[in-house]
Structures are given as C-alpha cells and as structure tokens.
Amino acid sequence: MPILSGGCACGAIRYTCEADPLFSLNCHRRDCQRESGSAFVPVLVVPRVAFEVTRGTARLFELTADSGHVTARAFCGDCGSPLFGLPGSAPEIVTIRAGSLDEPSAFRPSQDIFTSSAQPWDHMDPDLPKAVRLPAASAS
C-alpha cells in the first residue's frame, strides 16, 4: 500500500509514493506563487525512485529556476491541476504539491522558504523557521 497517493481534480492522472516525505515546506518564490495562484506552494519532497505516475500522462512546463537549472512542473492537461515538480538541481527528488494528495492532511511543513518574495498579505506561521532563499539540501 502506498504511503502517499494523489492526482488531479478530473481523475485523469494518478500517482503513488512508497516512501515517507524527506521534508515538507512552503515555497514563497514568485514563480511558485504564479503556479499556485496564491501566496506559496506547499510541497512534500520525496525520493524520485519511490514516486510513480500510475494513470495518465502529466503535461510538463519547464522553467529556469533561481539555481540556473531547468525545473519541470507537472500538471493535468485536462483540468489544469498542479501535481508535482521535477527539479533539475536535484534529479533524485520529486516535489509533490500538497493540494494534489488524496489526504492533504499528510502535509506538515517544516519551514517557509524564499520568504524574501512573500506577499505582505500572507500571514505565515510564526512557529516555522524562515529561509530567505532555498536551503542547500532542498529544491522546489
């Protein structure tokens, strides 16, 4: 039985993950805000070897991240739901979008990153550590 599972709003794309998240965070980077249409993207970072798309084929949108590496963002081409990311700076991980999980309550953020891009109307959890940029061991 997968530890995590999820998919898009219309059901065309499904995925599973057989490993616990390595960590979870809220990314406030400006292009993450554009992806989510909100203040940040909540992501669970998992090992790529444990992640599998089990139904459908996600559309990919590639962009150059602040690291200079190309990052691919996966979404449903039918309903537009954001699903996961494939960071070029860390090909060994997948960044699952918390809203795409079957059980989004599994998301427990450990920190806020790229807080220098946070919107003034975003009220971040004061108990979470803040990072102005991306920590060296992370990618979104």
Image (cartoon, rainbow, N blue to C red):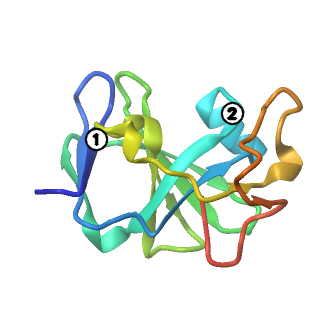
Q: Amino acid at mark 1?
A: Gly
> Image point 73% across, 68% down: which residue?
68
Residue assigned mark 2: 34
Report the number of numbered marks.
2
Number of residues whose C-alpha sits closer than 10 Å to that of mark 1, classed few (under 14), some (14–19) or many (20 or more):
many
Q: Nearer the viewer, mark 2 or mark 1?
A: 1
**Residue 8: image location, x then y, percent:** 32, 31
Element type where label 1 sits in the image: strand
Q: Quadrant of the N terminus?
A: bottom left
Reply above or below: 100 against 111. Answer: above
N-terminal of the pair, mark 2 or mark 1, is 1
CA distance for labels 2 and 1: 22 Å
Image-based side of 63 in relation to 72, left or right = right
> Image point 61% across, 35% down: which residue?
35
Residue assigned mark 1: 6
**Residue 48: image location, x then y, percent:** 36, 69
Q: Residue placed farthest to the left in the image?
A: 1
Q: Amino acid at mark 2?
A: Arg
Reply above or below: 129 against 5. Answer: below
> Image point 31% across, 38% down: which residue?
103
Reply above or below: 95 against 61. Answer: below
**Residue 95: image location, x then y, percent:** 48, 57
- Closer to the camera, 81 or 68? 81
